[in-house]
Amino acid sequence: METILDWLNRAMSLEGIWHDIVVAACIVALSVLARGIFTRYIFRLVLNMTKKTKTDLDEDILLAFEGPLKALISFTGLFLAVQYLPLAEPYQELALSFWRSFLIVFAAWGLYNLAGSSVFTGLAERMQVDRVLIVFAAKVFRFVIIALAASIIAGEWNYDVNGFLAGLGLGGLAFALAAQDAVSNIFGGVVIIMDKPFSVGDWIETPSVEGTVEEMTFRSTKVRTFANALVTVPNSIVANEPVTNWTRMGKRRITFHLGVPYTTPREKLKKCVEQIRAMLENHPEIHQETIFVRFDQFSESSLAIFLYFFTRTTVWAEYLKVKEDVNFKIMEILEREGVSVALPSRSIYFETPLPDSAAAGRR
């Protein structure tokens, strides 16, 4: 400390320009020291305080502005040092313009970092908004921040941005006309994200493709088919097609006709219908809201029993397992009642009886 004080006393004893330069250098050195104190002590103290709060918003804001604040401390020391020097008025005005411009840059820098933090993700969880929409909103927010910062800085340096903005409007119109398909795909992506007909991981079916949604962007939707092929569909097509989302089924349907022979007695047919219905009503994997088991019609080669019911699960593998179990139980009921499953058959009647085979052989 004695060495530092001695050096400061010698610096203060200087006269003229050297005195101003030494004082300016001291201001810069103090700003660097202040930045170190801020980084090591003040920032850590405030950060530890924000971690104890119930919300993460204050911590996210502090972390987003950490870099800009450190740079601001250093730049403030440099600006004060330049202001202390006996420079001509035009140079002082130039330094002031730089100071204002860098303030805008630091503010935009912090907001840009904030847009990429977990603030938008937490907002999406609270509002139950699709994550893809939040990512898009964050990108738009960043673009707006950069555009506003650039326009304010240009105005600070006395540049007329009105003509530039008008040129951007005409250029954007020409670009939109030249890239109609790309723009339609982007708007299609926005429509899909807003309407949310499906999400990543859903099993969907459209006239163009069927499979599991693997990725969604603002240009296209990537679907993994059941043949394990990856199909990329433009969003403009997906947005204008009917989309069946099989994943969002609350239950999964099973329906078919069970045919028994015409020789089946009425009482046995009635017992089979009643026992099949009772089996479905007591099956733990069958949804109990809708169960139909009825003797439906006299078909061409059998007496048709109509079955219409739903499984509780919508997962394909589990659905097949339940369906198989139901089929085995139906076979057990039919075997117990001595009723067989009718085979497709057709009876042919001849108007003129066929000649006896033995007589035909003697001719």
Image (spheres, grey):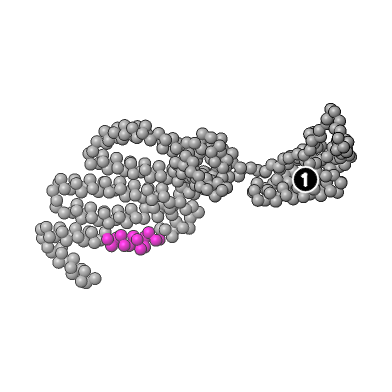
Q: Which residues are magenta?
A: 32-45
Query: Of helix, strand and loop, which one carries label 1?
Result: helix
The crowd level at tag 1 (other Cα within 10 Å; few <14, some 14-19, many 20+) is: many
- Whether residue 194 can be seen here: no
Q: Amino acid at mark 1?
A: Leu
Instruction: Name the one closer to the observer, 47 or 201.
Output: 201
Instruction: Name the one closer to the observer, 142 or 205.
Output: 205
Residue 172 to residue 39: above or below: above
Residue 287 to residue 46: above or below: above
Say whether residue 345 is left or right of residue 44.
Answer: right
The residue where tag 1 is placed is: 280
Residue 248 to residue 68: above or below: above
Residue name at image x 78 percent, y 41 percent: 343
Q: Residue furthest left?
A: 16
Image coordinates of residue 224 in percent, x first then y, are: 53, 47
Image coordinates of residue 110 in percent, x first then y, are: 36, 50
Residue name at image x 47 percent, y 39 percent: 234
Instruction: Name the one closer to the observer, 149 or 263.
Output: 263
Instruction: Name the one closer to the observer, 246 or 289.
Output: 246
- Whether residue 30 can be seen here: yes
Q: Main secondary structure of the magenta part?
A: helix
Q: Quadrant of the N terminus?
A: bottom left
Q: Quadrant of the C terminus?
A: top right
Q: Residue furthest bottom?
A: 2
